[in-house]
Amino acid sequence: MSAADVALFNDAETAMRLEAKFAKLEARAFLRLVIEDLFPGRIALVSSFGADSAALLHMVAQIDKAAPVLFIDTGVLFPETLAYRDRLIAHLDLRNVVNLTPDKSQLAEEDPENFLWAGNPDRCCEIRKVIPLAKALEGYEAWITGRKRFQARTRAALALFEAEGGRIKVNPLAGWSASDIDAYLAAHALPRHPLVAKGYPSIGCIPCTSPVKPGEDARAGRWRERGKVECGLHTQALDAASDI
């Protein structure tokens, strides 16, 4: 499979058949197929090192500890997230974690006081997350995300494969529940992000992340009361050549 096969996933009937076929695989077997057979050397895992990230990172580490893992350091992350990233890298012996950062000159021009999030959160996400990832994904035919259907209503119909801007996006844990994640973390004695115990089931940047109340979506604490539910990584094609 290559980027030329994106058309397969844009055809509803074909995509449905592929979804049904791959959904029968256990998550680790599915990941191994994607990494070793479908996109060998041409796929990266994008990880936030957030609340449930350890599960997917552990699976990838069991397949290939040198698989590229892209981490976006926006410059306004919780210190607990950065410490957790370093802890997981050591714990899982991850050997190819690439830290992405926003362009300093662009930040100096558009967000010199680190306050853009208050007036234009969409643009803040673009320059701190979307543009750095778009540049980093050049040369890759596919990327892996940790999104799951239970996290929010906007993700309820999430597919295993998505065609996006000439690239395939893979969501191996799409059908997992919160209890599935907890069981996996416990079974493999994986460390938890320290903010989870403080009521943060979804963790992003400091200014735009708040604790979640009982009964709310897991992502309800992201951009609370801002009418925003996604940072842009999953709502637009990541093409560094375009005017994102």
Image (tube, grey):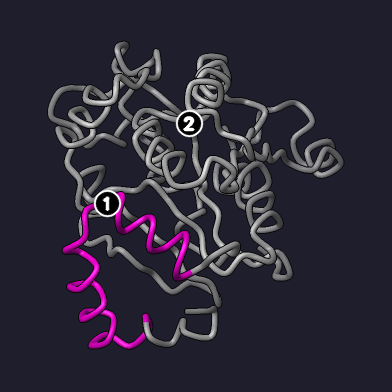
Secondary element type, mark 1: helix
Q: Could you tell me how many numbered marks the image carries?
A: 2
Q: Is residue 237 above or below residue 26?
A: below
State the image coordinates of residue 147 (x, y, percent, origin top left): 34, 48
Q: Is residue 132 above or below residue 113?
A: below
Residue at the (22%, 25%) spot, across then down: 187
Residue at the (84%, 36%) spot, across then down: 108
Q: Name the image quarter holding the C terminus.
A: bottom right
Q: Which residues are magenta?
A: 9-38
- Neighbor class of circle 1 (other Cα within 10 Å; few <14, some 14-19, many 20+) is some
Q: Which one is nearer the viewer's eye here, 154 or 180?
A: 180
State the image coordinates of residue 201 (x, y, percent, origin top left): 30, 27
State the image coordinates of residue 145 (x, y, percent, origin top left): 42, 51
> Residue 82 is drawn in which quadrant?
top right
- Neighbor class of circle 2 (other Cα within 10 Å; few <14, some 14-19, many 20+) is many
Kindly check if marks 1 and 2 are in contact, taking CB atoms under 8 A apart as contact. no
Q: Which one is nearer the viewer's eye here, 192 or 163?
A: 192
| Residue 27 - label | 1
State the image coordinates of residue 154 (x, y, percent, origin top left): 28, 54
Residue at the (27%, 87%) spot, across then down: 14
Q: Amino acid at mark 1?
A: Ala
Residue at the (71%, 67%) spot, across then down: 243
Is residue 29 toward the left or the right of residue 230 in the image? left
Residue bearing the label numbered 2: 49
> Residue 85 is drawn in which quadrant?
top right
Q: Which one is nearer the viewer's eye here, 96 or 175?
A: 96
